[in-house]
Amino acid sequence: MRFKFLLKPGWLALTLAVWVFAGACVYFLAPWQFGRNDERQGQNSAITRSLAGDPVPFGTQHDEWQKVELKGRYLPDGEALARLRTVQGEAAFLVITPFQTDSGKKVLVNRGYVRPVNGIKPPEFARAPTDEVTIIGLARNNESDARPAFQQDGHRQIYSINNDAVGPGIEPGHYQLVEKQAGALDTMPLPRIESGPFYSYALQWIAFGVMAVGGWLYFTIREARPGGVLSEERPKKKKTVAELLAEDGEEGADQGGAVADDAGQLHGTRHVT
């Protein structure tokens, strides 16, 4: 049976590894990258529409990244700093301040970022105004970590911009201030409007899966042919010219030794006579 080598433990392990890897590439890794590409395309479209359009009043139906106009007052006593962030490649704290709208609802406002002192501690920064203001921010979704705020280095700090982390009675999501708004610090830069590498990564994962299966098929067919590496009956390897010359030299030496022995025996016989 030409394919019985497929039942050998080593080959079975190789076959399993190849097909599991190929399946992961095609059914998990490539779709994951396609999904990230779709998310980036949707984000780019939303930002483009937001920048081109006018802000909508708070309470109006809106999507993420939509410009929203809020009227009300900041609540600085509930302020918290989002820690462990980077802005433009450098460490930063995001200043998250509750804001009570004129409708009575409380929301979170991302006033911008500040750079840490000595790389770890939050600096002093301008306090949010307490009088009534009108601000414009980009609607953003909640982040996932809802661990409550804690006190450190003289400030309340949070791991994630989440309404439950900052305090009770606050609406989900937050609003990221655009430039030149009341209470704004160094405002957050917008994401770049670009597709990113996700689509090409997805194609690469598909290519890796196809290459793995193709390599497995190639070596399987090669082993199934006579003379495969794992075949029990393999043709003898042809000898090189050097090996043939070495064998000829050994045969010549053996023949010369035999002639010398014969001559010695003959000489000894004549001497006795």
Image: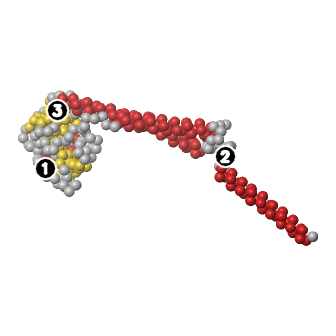
User: Residue 226: in sight, yes or no?
Assistant: yes
Please name the amino acid that badge 3 sits on.
Val
Q: Residue at x 29, y 41 (%)?
A: 144
Nearest to N terminus: mark 1 or mark 3:
3
Q: Residues within 10 Å of mark 3 (few under 14, many from 20)?
A: many
* Image-quadrant location for residue 229: top right
Q: CA distance from mark 1 to mark 2?
A: 83 Å
* Image-quadrant location for residue 180: top left
Asked whether, in this view, residue 30 is left or right of residue 153, the answer is right
Nearest to N terminus: mark 1 or mark 2:
1
**Which dot, 2 or 3, sits closer to the camera?**
2
Q: Residue at x 87, y 65 (%)?
A: 266
Residue under pointer 1:
125
Asked whether, in this view, residue 231 is left or right of residue 131, the answer is right
**Mark number displayed over residue 238:** 2
Nearest to N terminus: mark 2 or mark 3:
3
Q: Position of residue 110 (x, y in %)?
A: 18, 41
Residue under pointer 3:
68
SS assignment at label 2? loop
SS assignment at label 1? loop
Q: Residues within 10 Å of mark 1 (few under 14, many from 20)?
A: few
Q: Check the image and report above or below for 231 versus 122.
A: above
**Which dot, 1 or 2, sits closer to the camera?**
2
- For this orientation, the residue located farthest to the left is 131
Q: Residue at x 66, y 46 (%)?
A: 238
Please name the amino acid that badge 1 sits on.
Phe
Please name the amino acid that badge 2 sits on.
Lys
